[in-house]
Amino acid sequence: MKAALAPAVAAGVKARYPDLDPAAAEWLATGQHGTSSARMFYRLTGVRPNILRDDDDPMSHPLDPDDLRRCRLLLEQAPALQARLGEMRTVSPFWAALVDAWGDLCSTMDAECPAWRDGRGSARKTYDKMHALLERVVAPNSVRASGKSES
């Protein structure tokens, strides 16, 4: 049923956002959405996907390989956005760390989970790398908030 509706939904999105890149409009209509991929789409296009609620964290970033997978699918489906990935650095320190390591994260994910596009397989090394990056962002902020210095 969903596949049968996809062309009509895509046509509706393209009519509503005529200036939006056609590939980006196609993702908005039929792509796999998560909070981080929707945040990426919103930041790079200015069009807010319905999945984002008013109370969503404006800095929503990928937390695990499945989140990363949906972001990668967005960039594959709308290649014009790939060239603008660096703009995500300004969203938050978490996004900056992930963007700086994007190539390495993608290579790791490709090697350990070749069927990632289909959502099949396990990407434990990718998960570990992502969390190590994000922990490095959290740790300095925790030290500042507590007033303690590292010795």
Image: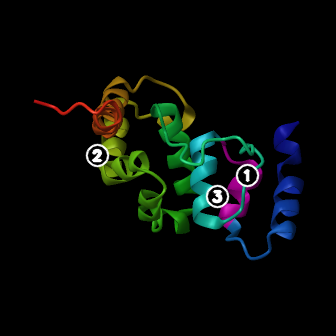
Label 3 and label 2: CA atoms lie apart by: 24 Å
* Disc 3 secondary structure class: helix
Quarter of the N terminus within the rendering: top right
The quarter of the picture where the C terminus appears is top left
- State which quadrant residue 65 falls in: top left
Q: Which residues are magenta?
A: 23-33
Q: Earlier in the sequence, mark 2 or mark 1?
A: 1
Mark 3, residue position = 42
Give the class, few, some or many, for how many residues have Cα within 10 Å of label 2's Cα (few <14, many ≥20): some
Give residue 71's position: percent from left, percent from top. Answer: 53, 47
Task: Identify the residue shown where x is 86% and y is 54%.
Answer: 9
CB atoms of marks 2 and 1 within 8 Å: no
Q: Which mark is residue 108?
A: none
Q: Residue at x 50, y 48 (%)?
A: 72
- Horizontal side of 147 relative to 64 (left or right) equals left
Q: Earlier in the sequence, mark 3 or mark 1?
A: 3
Q: CA distance from mark 3 to mark 1?
A: 7 Å
> What is the number of the mark on residue 104?
2
Q: Is residue 149 left or right of residue 142?
A: left
Pointer 1: what residue?
Answer: 49
Q: CA distance from mark 2 to mark 1?
A: 28 Å
Label 2 residue SS: helix
Vertical comparison of 43 with 34: above or below: below
Tell me which residue sits at (86%, 67%) in the image: 16
- Kind of residue sitting beneath label 2: Asp
Image x and y of residue 76, in percent: 53, 55
On the image, the x and y values in percent for residue 115 come to 47, 33
Residue 20 vs 113, above or below: the answer is below
Q: Quadrant of residue 80?
A: bottom right
The numbered mark, 3 or 2, whose residue comes first in the sequence reads: 3
